Image: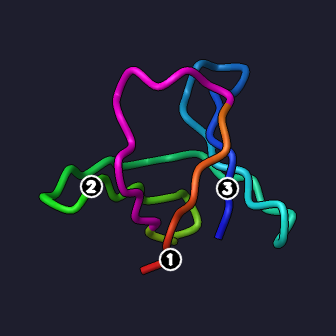
Amino acid sequence: MKVMLHKNDLGHLSVYVPKKDLEEEVVEQTTTTEGKILTLANGWQLSFDGLEDDAKLPQTFRARKL
């Protein structure tokens, strides 16, 4: 699914999922050999391939829900 990563007003990383009209703050980031896993405040875990720490935001990425 396509999601948009951006910094919210408080400077925290947030994820917006357009198809679900869902915006949640990232509460945990885990780096694996396959990429990054972001855990959202609602409990969702999204896997990103090739997501870098210094990516310019806001930006749209392809993510997989775990």
Residue sitting farthest toward the left: 33
Relative to 2, residue 54 above or below: above
Q: Who comes first in sequence, dot 3 or dot 2?
A: 3
- Residue 57 lies in the magenta-colored region: yes
Circles 3, 2 touching at the beta carbon (< 8 Å):
no
Distance of label 3 from label 2 (alpha carbons): 16 Å
| Most common secondary structure along the magenta stretch | loop
The answer to whether 12 appears left or right of 60 in the picture is: left
- Residue 54 lies in the magenta-colored region: yes
Q: Amino acid at mark 2?
A: Gly
Taking the spot 41% from the left edge, 57% from the top edge, the residue there is 48
Relative to 4, residue 3 above or below: below
Taking the spot 41% from the left edge, 55% from the top edge, the residue there is 38
Taking the spot 44% from the left edge, 69% from the top edge, the residue there is 45
Circles 1, 3 touching at the beta carbon (< 8 Å):
no
Judged by depth in the image, the label closer to the viewer, 2 or 1, is 2
Q: Secondary structure at mark 3?
A: strand
Residue 65 badge: 1
Taking the spot 54% from the left edge, 34% from the top edge, the residue there is 13
Q: Nearer the viewer, residue 19 or 61?
A: 61
Q: Position of residue 64 (x, y in %)?
A: 49, 73
Q: Secondary structure at mark 2?
A: loop
- Quadrant of the image occupied by residue 66: bottom left
Q: Mark 3 = which residue?
A: 3
Query: How many labels sit on residues?
Result: 3
Q: Amino acid at mark 3?
A: Val
Which stretch is magenta?
46-58
- Quadrant of the image occupied by residue 10: top right
Q: Mark 2 = which residue?
A: 35
Distance of label 1 from label 3 (alpha carbons): 11 Å
What quarter of the picture does the N terminus occupy? bottom right
